[in-house]
Structure formats: structure tokens, C-alpha cells
Amino acid sequence: MAWREDATIGKLRVEKSLTLANTGNDTAIVTGLSISSEFTTGISISGDGTTAFGITSGFTGTTMLSLGGTATNGINISGACTTGLNLSGSMTDGISFANTVTGDFIDFSGVTYVPTGSNGPSLIRCGTYANPLSHSVEAQSGLMRWYMETDANGTSYDRGLFVCLKTTGTKSIFPGAFLAEVKDQAGAGPVSCMAGQFISHLNSATAAMPASSSAQGLFGVWAKITANEGATVTTGCYSAPIWLDNQLNGSNIGSGGSLNTEYGIFATTGGSRPRGFVGFQTTSSGYYNLFSFDSTYSTSVSPCNGGAVATNTGGSTGSLKMEIDGTAYLIPYFAA
């Protein structure tokens, strides 16, 4: 170990390397490296190397690295590193925050992010599609889990997670995408597969929601599309708060006919009796139609049933088909 004492300020300056080791004859090291004085930079490693800062598994002390002073940067790595911080040992918590932070606990605002594809660099990554992080534990802790609670009053709100993705180009954007994929199965698969669950729960006998004159209240999901005055949605560009897309394929899907249980919307009730399946409210001029079938839905395609139905009476153009308890019924319609 090469080192020298600075005679002017009385500090220890390490020029090449510093090794803290318990030889087996000394008292066990409680703190591997402790810096408690006030420095501009507690530890600065600016050279090129394989490992910027490493503590081997032979260390059995209480604290590997303790920074107790006042500093601009607790740890500053400004050199070229393959991995800035590598946690490869066995530990209870990888990184634990137990203090008060007035800014951001983790801040990526100053990074240069250059995406190169689904397997390219990400700010935070856990596996790839071809090599995902896997386990065989029957548990439900999940990759990310957090719980929040507030007793604050006022007219504002809290968000557990907020994501905003902006664009000035032509590439499509999706602030959130969730894929639940059932892979090869030796036997029966999972009894439930959902890409997302959204539940608003009044979880107390005294929990209450006040009345509101606007469209606010208790909802599982609020889906909304909006545009400022002057924005353009070109004719032929489909737009809707929700896009329901049934794309199940294969001869083993469903049973066909009246036994088929695939739906565009599957609605269940189990609590109080709702006022209606669909509730309508408008701040403009409402809807032009209750249903709109385009040219791909001719009168011969369900749920439309055309002139071949002899029971159409009163000059009806055709019928809409519905089913109640396995029996098909027709609702005649007339030209407006």
C-alpha cells in the first residue's frame, strides 16, 4: 500500500491502493471505512478500472461503508466504469432508504437516454423477453410493490404512480403497456390471466364518498380522450376512450353457438342493484346514435339480422339479435 501523510493539513492521502483487512489476530472490524468529517467529496474514484469500489465477501463487520459527514456528494463516480455500483453479494435489502430526503430519492433527470429497441438500454431493467427474470415460488410479492396512506384534507389528490410521455414526432406512444402471457403448459393453465386490475374499494363500514354534481365519484377506471381547440382528428381516424379488441384464434377457443362464453364486455354484479348497465350524461350534445355499425357489419352479420327474418313486422328494415337465457330474440329496427 502506497500512501503519504500531508504535513500541511494532516490528512491521509492514498496514492495507489488502500486495503482494510482483518488478519485474524485483530479485533473484528466494526466499520470498514468511515468518513465523518466535512468534505466536498467523501470518496472520489476517477480512474479507469474494473471495479470502482469493492468490498470482498471476507468482510464480516457491521458497516461496510459509512458516510456520516456533510458533503455535496456522498459517493461520486465520475470515471469510466463497466458497472457503477454492483450489488452481487447475499443481502437482506439491496438499497434501503431510512432517512428524510427533501428532493428526489433517485433522479435520472441528468442522464442521456439512447433507446435501441426492446432489448436495448433502459433506465431500469429486469430481464428481457427472451430471458425474463424467473422463479418457481408460490408467492405473490411481485417485482414492485408499495403501499401509501394519507390523512390529508383538501381538494387536491394523491397519485401512487404517474407517467407522462410526450412526443413531437410521428412515432406512436404508449405511456404504459402490460402483457400477461400464458406460455407452454404441461397440464391445465392458470385459472385467471389479466393484464391489469383496477379496484376502488370502500374498505370500511364508515368509509364514505360524498355526492357530486359532476362526473366524479367511485370508479374502477377513468378512461378519457380529449383535445384542445384547433387540434385535428382526421376523418377516418378512429377515436374512443376504450378500444375492445377480441383476437382469440384457434379451434380450441370456446365451444361455439350458445355455449360460447367470449364477450366484448363481460359485466357482473354482486352488490347493490345498479340503476342501469350504461349511464349517460353529457356536457355537449350527446351521441348521434346508441349503436353505430359500419360497412363491415352488413345486415347478414350478427348482431344484425337482415330481411331474411320473416317475423319483422310493420315494415322494419331488419333486426338486432339478442339472447336471454339461451334463447335468441330479435329487436326490429326501422329507417329513421
Image: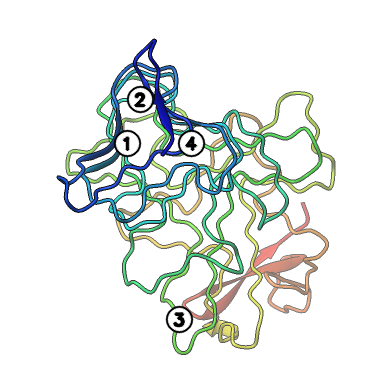
Q: Residue 35 or 109: which is nearer the viewer? A: 35
- The Cα–Cα distance between marks 2 and 1, rounded to whole angstroms, is 9 Å
Foreground mark, 4 or 3?
Answer: 4
- The Cα–Cα distance between marks 3 and 1, rounded to whole angstroms, is 39 Å
The percent coordinates of residue 329 (x first, y second) are 58, 74
Find residue 320 and name its label. Answer: none
Residue 105 in the image: above or below residue 247: above
* Residue identifier under label 2: 101
- The Cα–Cα distance between marks 1 and 4, rounded to whole angstroms, is 32 Å
Tell which circle, 2 or 4, labels the residue nearer the N-terminal end.
4
Residue 230 in the image: above or below residue 97: above
| Image quadrant in which the N terminus is located | top left
- The Cα–Cα distance between marks 4 and 3, rounded to whole angstroms, is 59 Å
* Residue identifier under label 4: 16
Give left or right: position of 129 versus 302: left
Question: Would you say the residues marked 1 and 4 are in contact, meaning their CB atoms lie under 8 Å apart?
Answer: no
* Residue identifier under label 1: 97
Tell which circle, 1 or 4, labels the residue nearer the N-terminal end.
4
Q: Residue 181 or 258: which is nearer the viewer? A: 181
The percent coordinates of residue 43 (x first, y second) are 43, 29
Q: Amino acid at mark 3?
A: Gly
- The Cα–Cα distance between marks 3 and 2, rounded to whole angstroms, is 45 Å
Question: Would you say the residues marked 2 and 1 are in contact, meaning their CB atoms lie under 8 Å apart?
Answer: yes
